[in-house]
Every structure is written in structure tokens, then in C-alpha cells.
Amino acid sequence: MQISKGVEWAAHAAVMMIALPEGRGLKAEALARYHEVPTAYMAKQLQALSKAGIVQSSRGAHGGYRLARPATDITLWDITAAIEGHGPVFRCTEIRQNGPCGLKRKDCKNPCQIASAFAVAERAFRDSLKTVTLADLGMQVLQGSRPGHLSDVGNWLDSETMPLSDKT
């Protein structure tokens, strides 16, 4: 399975939002600048997170993004599904029915063993992502940070966060 850069960027942006003070948000431009990624693409990921109810947005001069619910209630699967969708990664095309020795449709009542194996793997992948919350990731970031890094991030947040307007 390959996960798009958008999932990575959305997850990093969401983890950054854990530290936002109440009533404050970050603009897509600020998050893009912080991670050195294209603003338009970061904005696209944030819009997908907003549509999924993971972040809330406010428009206007005092607009920005913040988490829509507690970090303990948002999983990596929530973020992945918001960006990639809920559909399966593997889609069986019944190739076993093709070619000179292909099976007849009536002989394919049971799912293809290959499709079944991929389905089991995908369930395990999704179940694993459902166990990791943003709060878990935030704690890991705190524990893995070098001395001074957290104060650098805090100073950056102080300079970049905006009080949110009531416009959504």
C-alpha cells in the first residue's frame, strides 16, 4: 500500500494543532510555510480534514484551522480516510476469469484467494491506524524532541496563530 504525501502532511498539520490555545487557529499558509510544502496543496488537505469533521475552519482575516474535536478522539485512520477515502486499496478485477484457461463466472462463487488475502491485510492496516490517536502522536513528539525544540515551536505558534472569527 502506498499512502499519499497528503496523508503525511495532514497528519503533521493536525498534530501541530494540538498545541493551539483555545480560540486560536492557524492559516493554511502558515502550516505550509512551517512544513515547507506548497500552500495550495496544504489547503487542499485541510479542506478534506474539515469536510471529515477533523478540523474546523474560520474564514476571513481572522480565519484559520483548529482541531474540531479532542486529539484523543482523532486517529490516524480518520486522517487517512479523510484524505484517501474509505474505499479499499485493492480492487479485484477477477483476472482469474481471463485468458485461455480462465475460470467460468459460475465457478467463481467464492472470493478470489488473492483478493481475500489483500482484504485481510487491509483490515489489519486500518485496525492498526485506528489505535493511534493524535494525542498519542503528540506525546511521542514531546518525548522525542531535542532540548529547545518545543520552545522554538511554541514561539512560532505564538507568532503565527490568529484569534478565530465566528465565520465558518
Image (tube, rainbow, N blue to C red):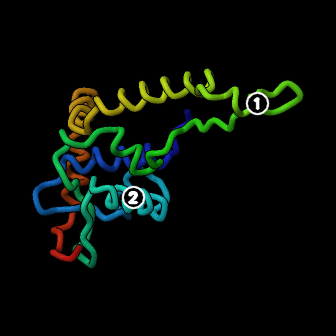
Image quadrant where one finds the N terminus: top right
Q: Can residue 14 be seen in this view?
A: yes
* Residue extending farthest left: 22
Dot 1: what SS?
loop
The disc label shown at residue 48, or none: 2
Q: Which of marks 2 and 1 is nearer the N terminus?
A: 2
Residue 133 vs residue 119, the one in the foreground: 119
Q: Which residue is drawn at 36% across and 27% down?
A: 128
Instruction: Give the percent coordinates (x, y) of residue 17.
Output: 24, 51
Q: In which quarter of the image is residue 61?
A: bottom left
The disc label shown at residue 104, or none: 1
* Image-based side of 56 in relation to 123, left or right: left
Q: Is residue 145 visible?
A: no
Q: Which residue is drawn at 67% across and 28% down?
A: 108
* Image-based side of 158 in relation to 9, left or right: left
Q: Which residue is drawn at 44% across and 50% down?
A: 83
Instruction: Give the percent coordinates (x, y) of residue 69.
Output: 18, 51
Q: Do the residues labelled 2 and 1 touch (CB within 8 Å)?
A: no
Q: In which quarter of the image is residue 97?
A: top right
* Residue extending farthest right: 100
